[in-house]
Image (tube, coloured by chain):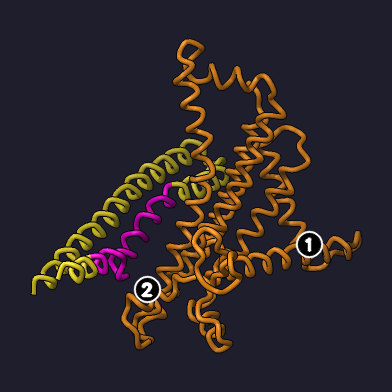
Amino acid sequence: MSQLPGNYIEHHLEHLQLNLNTFTMGNGGFWTLNLDTFIVGLITALLIGGLFRYVAVNMTVGVPGCLQNFVEACIGFVDRTVRDTYHGKSQLIAPLALTLFLWIFLMNTLDLLPVDFIPSLMQMMGVQHFKIVPTADPNMTFSMSITVFCLILFYNFTVKGWHLGKEVLTKPFGPWLFPVNIFFRLLEELVKPFSLALRLFGNMFAGELIFVLIAMLPWWSQWLPGGIWAIFHILIITVQAFIFMMLTIVYLSMAHDSH
Amino acid sequence: MEIASLVAQVQSFKAIAAGLLIGLASLGTAIGFGILGGKFVEGVARQPELSNLLMVRVLIMSALVDAFAVISIVMGLLLFFTNGPFVSYVLETAKQVS
């Protein structure tokens, strides 16, 4: 590493961007597509979808192989978690939770690759900036959390119907304080997408930045802090994926329960 | 020379801000984890057969306690290690004035 530390970090924080106004590389203000996030997210999604599809097609009722056992364990785990929290009969929540959990987990796992490995590989092919972890990009996490938010709104309106109005007007403080109730309810709903997205983004971004900082140490002293942080990070990526799934289930079941 | 002192002033404030961001966030999570772990041990001591269930809950809560502190710490580290907009803003203003 022959650059200044500030430049090295800032080089690692830049995305491979596509300007959607002119379809050239570069920052286009609002109409910018972060190509690296998009491509890596798509690849990981296809990987999971393809794997599960493959297992589902080749499923045996006899002695299952390693892969089928793994997939069944994943599905069983998510199914149990959903059953513990949500007691209705929605066809959507369990598959949504499974998708979110595995997808976020796989995208987070890319954080454990060496920080300079993929960017330098891309640099050999002529691409200047490439960020490998999609969940360390707020666009990715916000797109997921806003989707969940839209589902929350949809179920609030369709399942509760007129009860929703009653709930919004009278919920914590009774009917006489209805302006306060409306304000509290709006705040409560609007905080959900932000807290979901910022929590995941913050953790992944933090992990990546600390890996970058470790990579700036001299090469002989990187092993110990890098190893410790990587082991701690395995816990973080799993727990963050689980939290995102869990909170999605909780929010959606709150949207289903009418009081 | 004046520009150097201005930049030094900005950098010193940046260092103080980074210290506050990292330190206060760590303080908050330390208190949170203390309460969380203490209550967990109390709960397990009261009902040891629930320890697996409580462990999962504690892990979930620990991620919630951790999350915003981590964001704050990273903002502090970013402020500390990257050049950021502040110094370049000072330099540009100085260039316009002189």
Q: Quadrant of the N terminus of chain A?
A: bottom left
Residue A201 in the image: above or below residue A8: above
Residue B24 in the image: x percent, y percent?
Answer: 27, 51
| Amino acid type, callout 2 | Leu
Residue at which label 2 appears: A213
Q: Chain of mark 1?
A: A
Q: Residue at x 65, y 19 (%)?
A: A163
Q: Regarding mark 2 in the picture, which secondary structure is present there?
A: helix
Circle 2 packing at 10 Å, graded few (<14), some (14-19), many (20+), is some
The magenta region covers B65-89
10 Å neighbourhood of mark 1: few (<14), some, or many (≥20)? some
Residue under the image location 51 percent in, 28 percent down:
A185
Colour representing chain B: yellow
Which residue has dot 1 on it? Answer: A52
- On whether disc 2 and disc 1 are found on a single subunit, the reply is yes
Q: Looking at the picture, how far across and down is residue A173, in whole percent? A: 47, 16
If you read the primary sequence from the N terminus, does the residue marked by circle 2 or circle 1 appear first? 1
Say which element carries label 1: helix
Residue A184: within the magenta?
A: no
Q: Of the numbered discs in the image, which one, if any, rests on residue B84?
A: none
Residue B98 or A191: which is nearer the viewer? B98
The image position of residue A86, as x and y in percent, is 68, 36
Taking B93 as reference, is A110 left or right? right
Quarter of the image for the C terminus of chain A: give it: top right
Question: Is A163 placed above or below A73 here?
Answer: above
Q: Chain letter for orange? A: A
Amino acid residing under circle 1: Phe
Residue at 54 percent of width and 55 percent of height: A239
Q: Disc 2 vs disc 1: Cβ atoms closer than 8 Å?
A: no
